[in-house]
Each structure stands twice: as structure tokens, then as C-alpha cells.
Image: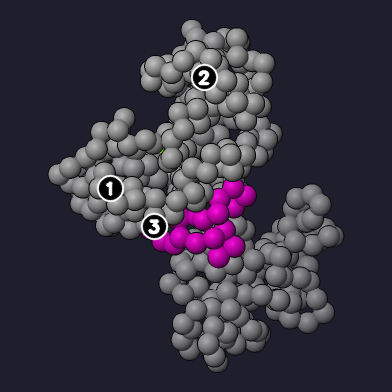
């Protein structure tokens, strides 16, 4: 049974179709990252699940319970959903423990129980001993941890995160990624995590859903999304690489022989048809070699530990490759291809 089941959800704001017929299930206990360009509808989808927006069409169920359709909406506070935003929305005049214990105090729990629960969640987010600190005496990363603790302490079965790390610098983001993993393991909650950052999504989530202009393009495991994107916009949005034109000259099951600039290679695909195709080439599947695809070095950029080479093919198309050595612009090289993916919906 799915914990959250979204069916044919649409939501329009004036002339903007923010969500356009989205159907998506979030299994109980799953950790799903919602990825997509700015304005694609990620926050709107979260707000619909939390109950801050109502759908124009479609339905949302938690288990078998209908929580929203165009005529009936369960109020946000009745949904048992925790939500953490980019802006932490903490009370600056309260100390850490006061902020974190707020959801418990509103339930009228005993003082001892509250203190124990607060200590437990502060330990979970790495803030042990900071309960008496004022919020305005904390760093950005520590404030974000307080917001997480306040969300976890409420014991919600569903937790929604809307770009929770967007305000933090790159080092803090990296350390916080582990905290989210810990929270998921400790709470067993169904988590939906919105981010712009594909690295964060690949590292954290067991599933990734990619949205574009209010539509769901693909949902799958991080490996599926990276290795077998069903749409050019998924391929372009997740991971580095290049999409080039080719011809499928032969195919059997989900393997094909494709021709790129005169070179024949084997490619993976799904439901491949003969004729023109769009082919995804990831940098790690390409290497400089004595024979292969002829190309010219357009740029060589040190990315530590490798040099990222931007190469131009005879067709004018560009590909990306990582090489241990720096190369000079204008150098003629050959590229061997060990893996390629025929994008089905290109
Ligand atoms: N209350 C609103 N009134 C009018 N337009 C809105 C409203 N909320 C969202 N929109 C529009 O709906 C579209 C989707 O917005 P949404 O906030 O869901 O995008 P997003 O994917 O979260 O983007 P970002 O990554 O920038 O946060 C955008 O074009 C946005 O301008
Ligand atoms: Mg948003």
C-alpha cells in the first residue's frame, strides 16, 4: 500500500499551469527526491500534500484516506505531515529546547516526557547540550538542525522538506546530508525532499522524481535516472554528459547498434526503433584512445583530480570526457565509447 498516492493532480495559478496531471505514489517509508528546474511545480506539489493548497483536479490519498480532491480537503493540522522549509521559521526569542518542544507542549505531554524526547531528537541532529542556547546565537547550520529537530519530534509519518539546505554553504550542506539519512533511518517516515541539487538527490534518496513544467517526466531509482533517463530533459538535468544525434542501424531487445559520426557502437535502450536517435554519452563511459570517434579539443579544465575535456565532433556536436592529463585546445584526438544510452522520448 502506498503511503501517499497522488492521482491526476492539476493546479493552475491564473495563466500558469503549475501542475498538469501528475500521478505519483510515495511508498510507506520511502525517501523520494523531487528534482526539476525552478518553477516546475515542486513546492506546489509539496504544499498540496501538506494541505496549504487545494487541487483543481485529481486526488491525494494517505493510505486509503482521501485527504484532498477539488471539493474536500483535510485541514493541514489534521494530516500528520511535518514540513521543513528553506527559511527555518524558528522563534528567535525562545531557546533551542523551547523551539523543539513546541509541538509537544501544544499536545499537553508531561514535562519529563517532553525533556526526554527533546534530548533524543537533539542528539539525532547533533545538537546535544545546546538546548539552552538562544536561536539567534546559533550558526545557520545549527538553526537548520533545530528546525529539523522540531519537525522530527512531532513524530509525523510523512515529512516534507522544501530545499532545506538552500541557505547553507557547501561544506555544511555536505555534513547535513548525513543527518537526513539518519533521520530517515531513525523515524521510518515517508520523506519527500525537494532540491535543485542533483548531487544531494542522488546521494540521499531511494527514488527520484523529475518534474518539468508541471509534468512528471520520470520516477525511478537514482541509478535508473542517471543511467536510463527516458527524456532529454531528465538526461540534461541529472548528471554531466552530452546528448548527440545518431542512427540506430540494428536492434535486438534493449540493445542496439548505433552510428555516431560514422562510428558504430553498441548502446543500451528501451523499445529502440531503427532510424534517427538521440544518444546520451556520460563522461565516465568515454576515454581517449588510438581509434574511435575523431574529435578536437575545445577546452581542457582542471576539475581535480581529472581534467574535463570538452571535445567537438565532426558534426559540431560537443561531448565531455575526463582525462588524467591536460590537453591543448585544437588537439586532434580519438574517443572510445564503452557505454551509451538511446533516449526513448527524444
Ligand atoms: N500562489 C501563487 N500564485 C501565482 N503563481 C504561483 C503561486 N505559487 C506558484 N506559482 C507559480 O507556479 C509555478 C510553480 O511554482 P513552484 O513554486 O511550485 O515552483 P518550484 O518548482 O518550487 O520552483 P523553485 O525551484 O524556484 O522553488 C511557477 O510558475 C510559480 O510562479
Ligand atoms: Mg520551490
Q: Marks 2 and 3: in contact by CB < 8 Å?
A: no
Magenta segment: 202-224
| Whether residue 318 is visible | no
Quarter where residue 22 is shown: bottom left
Q: Marks 1 and 2: in contact by CB < 8 Å?
A: no
**Rendered position, 4 above or below 170:** below
Residue topped by disc 1 = 65
Mark nearest the camera among 2 and 1 is 2
Quarter where residue 183 is shown: top right
Residue 185: which disc? none
Residue topped by disc 3 = 1
Residue 113: which disc? 2
Q: Nearer the viewer, residue 64 or 77?
A: 64
Q: Position of residue 150 (x, y in %)?
A: 49, 25
Q: Is residue 205 magenta?
A: yes
Residue shown at 44% from the left, 62% from the top: 218
Secondary structure found at label 2: helix
Q: Is residue 208 magenta?
A: yes
Q: Is residue 7 left or right of residue 30?
A: left
Q: Residue furthest right?
A: 325
Quarter where residue 228 is shown: bottom right
**Rendered position, 150 above or below 294:** above
**Earlier along the polypeptide chain: callout 3 or callout 1?**
3
Ligand 1 contact, mark 3 (Cβ < 8 Å): no
Secondary structure found at label 3: loop
* Mark 2 → mark 1, Cα distance in angstroms: 31 Å
| Whether residue 103 is visible | yes
Q: What colour scheme was applied to this rendering of the protein?
A: one colour
Residue shown at 59% from the left, 62% from the top: 223
Amino acid at each position: 500500500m502506498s503511503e501517499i498516492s497522488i492521482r491526476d493532480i492539476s493546479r493552475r495559478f491564473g495563466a500558469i499551469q503549475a501542475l498538469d496531471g501528475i500521478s505519483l505514489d510515495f511508498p510507506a517509508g520511502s525517501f523520494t527526491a523531487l528534482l526539476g528546474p525552478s518553477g516546475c511545480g515542486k513546492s506546489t506539489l509539496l504544499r498540496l500534500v501538506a494541505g496549504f493548497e487545494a487541487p483543481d483536479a485529481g486526488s491525494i490519498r494517505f493510505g486509503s484516506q482521501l485527504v484532498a480532491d477539488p471539493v474536500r480537503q483535510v485541514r493541514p493540522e489534521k494530516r500528520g505531515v511535518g514540513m521543513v522549509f528553506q527559511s527555518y521559521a524558528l522563534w528567535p526569542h525562545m531557546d533551542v529546547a523551547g523551539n523543539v518542544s513546541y509541538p509537544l507542549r501544544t499536545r499537553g505531554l508531561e514535562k519529563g516526557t517532553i525533556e526526554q524526547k527533546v534530548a533524543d531528537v537533539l542528539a539525532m541532529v547533533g545538537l546535544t547540550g545546546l538546548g539552552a542556547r538562544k536561536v539567534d546565537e546559533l550558526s545557520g547550520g545549527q538553526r537548520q538542525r533545530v528546525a529539523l529537530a522540531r519537525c522530527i519530534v512531532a513524530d509525523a509519518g510523512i515529512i516534507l522538506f522544501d530545499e532545506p539546505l538552500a541557505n547553507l554553504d557547501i561544506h555544511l550542506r555536505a555534513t547535513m546530508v548525513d543527518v537526513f539519512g539518519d533521520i530517515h533511518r531513525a523515524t521510518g517516515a515517508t520523506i519527500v525532499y525537494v532540491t535543485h541539487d542533483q548531487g544531494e538527490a542522488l546521494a540521499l534518496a531511494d527514488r527520484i522524481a523529475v518534474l518539468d513544467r508541471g509534468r512528471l517526466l520520470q520516477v525511478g531509482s537514482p541509478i535508473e535516472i542517471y543511467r536510463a533517463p527516458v527524456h532529454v530533459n531528465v538526461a540534461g538535468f541529472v548528471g554531466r554528459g552530452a546528448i548527440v544525434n545518431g542512427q540506430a542501424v540494428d536492434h535486438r531487445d534493449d540493445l542496439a547498434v548505433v552510428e555516431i559520426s560514422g562510428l558504430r557502437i553498441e548502446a543500451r535502450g528501451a523499445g529502440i526503433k531503427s532510424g534517427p536517435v538521440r544518444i546520451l554519452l556520460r563522461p565516465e563511459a568515454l576515454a581517449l584512445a588510438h581509434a574511435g570517434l575523431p574529435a578536437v579539443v575545445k577546452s581542457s579544465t582542471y576539475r581535480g583530480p581529472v581534467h574535463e575535456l570538452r571535445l567537438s565532433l565532426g558534426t559540431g556536436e560537443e561531448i565531455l570526457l575526463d582525462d588524467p592529463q591536460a590537453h591543448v585546445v585544437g588537439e586532434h584526438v580519438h574517443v572510445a565509447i564503452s557505454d551509451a544510452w538511446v533516449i526513448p522520448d527524444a
